[in-house]
Image (cartoon, helix red, strand yellow):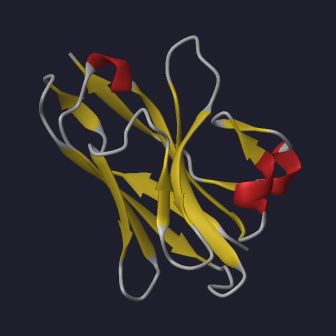
Amino acid sequence: QVQLVESGGGSVQAGGSLRLSCAASGYRYSANSMGWFRQGPGKEREWVGHFDSDGAVSYTDLVKGRFTISKHSAKTVLYLQMDSLKPEDTAMYYCANSRVGAWPKFIRGGRILKSAEFPYWGQGTQVTVS
């Protein structure tokens, strides 16, 4: 059973930084990949970034150059380093785990095309930027 637990959210002033963590267990490292989504107030859930099958990281243009996704060497913890935060980054942030092939195939324009392809989610952690 895949389990994901996020932590590290909080309130910060614009221009500040936060680092989110996602502790993961119960998944096959070779078959699955992990990434981050967020959902702002009154908005749809949107893709932030994820690890590709070759180990590179893809990001939405909204955060490119400001956010960095990394993982612990044991692949059990996923991180989201957020710098130069803006008020529009205010959202609940979720980590997700899915098979490697789902990410490039079922995300378009930052949106999930088929929710069943992303069955594993953490509970979310709130980030508020003022």
Is 115 situated left or right of 48 in this image? right
Residue 107 image offset from top left, x and y in percent: 72, 45
Evaluate whether residue 119 shows in this view: no
Is 60 situated left or right of 106 in this image? left
Image quarter where the C terminus lies is top left
Is 127 situated left or right of 38 in this image? left
Q: Quadrant of residue 10?
A: top left
Residue 111 image offset from top left, x and y in percent: 70, 34
Residue 98 image offset from top left, x and y in percent: 71, 64
Number of dots carrying numbers: 0
Residue drawn where x is 51% and y is 77% of the image: 55
Is 45 situated left or right of 80 in this image? right
Residue drawn where x is 63% and y is 36% of the image: 110
Residue drawn where x is 13% and y is 23% of the image: 13
Question: Is residue 31 depicted above or below 100 in this figure?
Answer: below
Q: State the residue lying farthest toward the top.
A: 42
Residue drawn where x is 26% and y is 43% of the image: 66
Evaluate whether residue 50 shows in this view: yes
Image quarter where the N terminus lies is bottom right
Q: Quadrant of residue 108?
A: top right
Question: Is residue 103 depicted above or below 8 in this figure?
Answer: below
Question: Is residue 124 depicted above or below 76 in this figure?
Answer: above
Q: Quadrant of residue 22?
A: bottom left
Residue 11 image offset from top left, x and y in percent: 22, 28
